[in-house]
Structure formats: structure tokens, C-alpha cells
Image (cartoon, helix red, strand yellow):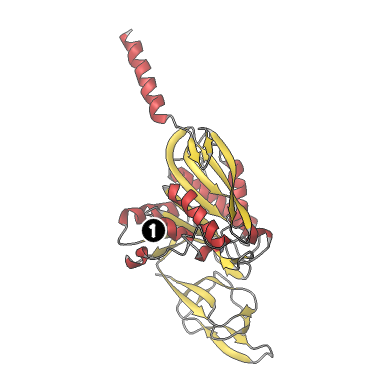
Amino acid sequence: MKRAVFISLLILIHTYTLAQTPFSFQSHSIVPGTKSHIKIEVSSDKSSTFIPITIFHGLKSGPVLGITAGIHGYEYPPILAAQQLNQKIDPKELSGTIILVQLANVPAFLGRSAYLNPLDGKNLNRSFPGNPKGTITERIAHKITTEVIAKSDFFVDMHGGDAPEDLRSYNAWYQSEALPEVSKKGKEMALAMGFDYSIIFNIQKERLKTRSIYCSQEAFHRKIPSVDIECGRLGIAGKKETSQIINGMLSLLEHLKMLETNTKLNDVKPRIIAKRSTIKSKSTGLFYTEKKAGDFIKKGELVGYVTDFFGNRLEQIKASENGVILYMIGTPPINKDETLMNIGILP
Ligand SMILES: [Zn+2]
């Protein structure tokens, strides 16, 4: 009899420690073991839109992982990966909670607009933490900050090369001497994703006191381990890149002990890049290059040129450092002071 009581007590303790209460999100209450699709309405004086969000609330307790796709509406692999993660993640198998922003910038997506929200001409990934009384983009940023980032224990923002950007896939984690524990967790997250290039976004202590500007950086400013994914190029809805993002995210869920996924990653030891160099254009006109993202270049090497609208060469573009082209302008239009190439300096 005593033994039976003891066993009952054990079962009770076990059930108690694993039991989850419903997850509250705005006016919704999401029962453990289920998922909910929610549209957050956002409107300003001039326009209105919505943010489609899926919340997976696991049967078992665990951390809250925030994920955003479509901060840039022309970067399709992350958006398509989010659509598929929606199907692949079973809340009955999940420990913890996932807040998945399927598409942060619906107006940019439907308007097929690179970088900018066509409703106000602003770049959502330059608008964080946002402003509840600002333009529509600033209000979207504010909603994501307060409803997603602020509720997360871990955070991932997913991007790719926008319409004119050729890009070599990588992920990145935020790191700062001021936040060693948060930085370490971010590094572990990034490395768990199986990307062969990982970049360190090093943030000075003073920078942490200023406006975050970027979505993933807002999470880091709030002491949340934060990773940025960059996967996809030239606004193409690439299947390979979409799969890479899905596998990376499933592997991250395994690393965070939120889901058993048995994801198979390639065994590559990642190249870690701590330093980058930017080549900017001094002229406006047409950019010509034989290079593509992922190419290795040598300091001083001619990597392209810019002409005016009559074909006269205005500028020879030379590599600023030895390294790998992480992303570059892959189409002809170029404006003065724009980034032509971002080079990862290999150790
Ligand atoms: Zn982006």
C-alpha cells in the first residue's frame, strides 16, 4: 500500500513538472499540445496590414523560441521555410513554445518590393525597436518587439539575399564582452544549425545602450541569445536554400531540447568569420563584375567596374582585403555610397 502511494506521488510529481499551462498571447489562450494561427492587426493613420503568426505550444514545458521570417518581403527561402516549419513541427512532440512570424512584412511581400515596405518606403530591418505611434513599418517593428522578441528566451531572424543581392549562405550570432553568457548561448545556437560559414556580430558595450535598429539585434539588446540567418540569393525562391534553413532550424530545436528531430546535418566544421570589410561605390551608374558570392578574392584584385549611362568607365573596383565575398550587388544598378561587396576576412 505504501508503495502504491509512493508511486502515485511520483507520477503526480512527474506530471506536475511536465505539465504546461496555456500560453497567453494577446486575447488568445493556446492549450498545451496545440498550435494557433493568429493575425495581428497593425494600422497607422494612413494604412493597415497584419502579421501572420503561428504559435506552437508544447505539451511539455521548455523555453520560448521566437522566429521571424519575411522582415524583408523579397527574401523567399526564409518565408518558404517558415511555411514548411508550420507543417513539420508537431506541438504534441514539442517541449516549450515557438512563436513563428510567418511573414513580418506582408505589404513588401505582396508588393514584390525589395528592402522597403511600399506603404511608407521604410526598411523594417532598420526600424527596431519600432514606435507604436510611428509609420506602418515602425508599428510593425513595435509589434514584433513587444509580442515576439520580448516573450522569447531565444531568437532567430531569417533572411537571404534580397532581389539585387547575390549572397553566400551563412548564419551569425551576436557577441559582446558585456554579455558573455548570452553571447555563448547565441554561439551554441548558431553552430548547432550546421551552416558551414558562421559570422560573429561583435557589439561594443556602448552600442548596447543605443537603438537596436536591426530585428535580431533588438533581441540581443534585451539579453536574449540571438542568431541571424542569411540564406538565399537574388530574390530567388531556391529549394536548396529553403531546405538548408529548415534543417538548420530543426537542428536548433534539437539543440535547445525542444524537439527530437533526427536532423542530418553535413559534418562540415564551420569557418568562423570575425572580421568583414565593405567595398562601397563612389559612383552612380552601371556595375559590371565577373564575380559572384562565395568567390575568394585577393586584396587589390580588380573585381569589377562602374560606368556612367554612356558606357564611360567611372571607377575600377578593387578588393579591399583577402577573403570571401559574403554578399554583393549582383545586378547592374548602383548608387553612390552603396555597398558593392561585403567580404568575410578568413582567419
Ligand atoms: Zn533581409
Judged from this view, the residue extending furthest toward the bottom is 312
**Figure quadrant of residue 180:** bottom left
Residue toward you, 223 or 321: 223
Res. 194 visible in picture: no
- Residue at figure coordinates x 38%, y 55% from the top left: 222
Depicted 5 relative to depicted 245: above or below: above
Q: Quadrant of the N terminus?
A: top left
- Position of 253 with respect to 331 (left or right) is left
- Position of 263 with respect to 186 (left or right) is right
Q: Residue 85 placed where, x, y %?
A: 58, 46
Dot 1 surroundings within 10 Å: few (below 14), some, or many (20 or more)? many
- Residue at figure coordinates x 56%, y 38% from the top left: 35
Q: Residue 190 placed where, x, y %?
A: 44, 55
Under mark 1, the amino acid is His
Q: Quadrant of the C terminus?
A: bottom left
Q: Residue 268 placed where, x, y %?
A: 47, 56
Q: Residue 119 placed where, x, y %?
A: 63, 64
Q: Which residue is mark 1?
A: 221
Res. 30 visible in picture: yes
Depicted 282 relative to depicted 24: above or below: below
- Residue at figure coordinates x 33%, y 67% from the top left: 206
- Position of 29 with respect to 108 (left or right) is left
Residue toward you, 287 or 45: 45
Residue behind label 1 places its C-beta within 8 angstroms of ligand 1:
no
- Residue at figure coordinates x 53%, y 75% from the top left: 341
Judged from this view, the residue extending furthest toward the top is 1
Depicted 243 relative to depicted 306: above or below: above
Q: How many marks?
A: 1
Residue toward you, 99 or 282: 99
Judged from the image, the secondary structure of the residue bearing numbered disc 1 is helix
